[in-house]
Image (cartoon, rainbow, N blue to C red):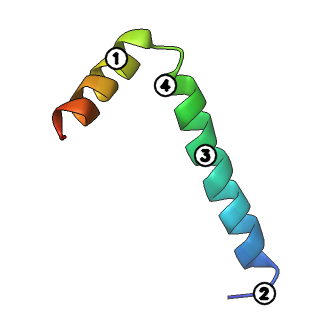
Amino acid sequence: MKTWLKPWLMRLALAVVLTLVFAAYLKPDFMLDMATRLYMCF
């Protein structure tokens, strides 16, 4: 893999993950469900 391509792929992956996280905040029911599931693990 080219040396200049790897940093751009990492940045793209980070941008996609952050976009999905911020999009999840637009659905409060989803966030409450995820928080409840996380809490039930402990």
- Residue placed under numbered mark 3 in the picture: 16
| Nearest to viewer (mark 4 / mark 1) | 1
**What is the quadrant of the N terminus in the image?**
bottom right
14 with respect to 37 (left or right): right
Measure how far apart labels 2 and 3 are at the Cα level: 21 Å
Disc assigned to residue 3: 2
Measure how far apart labels 1 and 3 are at the Cα level: 22 Å
Image height of 2 relative to 17, above or below: below
- Work out which residue is located at the far front of the displayed protein and give it: 42
27 with respect to 5 (left or right): left
- Residue placed under numbered mark 1 in the picture: 32
- Residue placed under numbered mark 4 in the picture: 24
Image height of 39 relative to 8, above or below: above
| Nearest to viewer (mark 2 / mark 4) | 4
Measure how far apart labels 4 and 1 are at the Cα level: 10 Å
Q: Position of residue 9 (x, y in %)?
A: 68, 66
Which mark is first along the chain, 3 or 1?
Answer: 3
- Work out which residue is located at the far right of the displayed protein and give it: 4
Element under disc 1: helix
| Nearest to viewer (mark 3 / mark 4) | 4
Image height of 20 relative to 12, above or below: above
Element under disc 2: loop
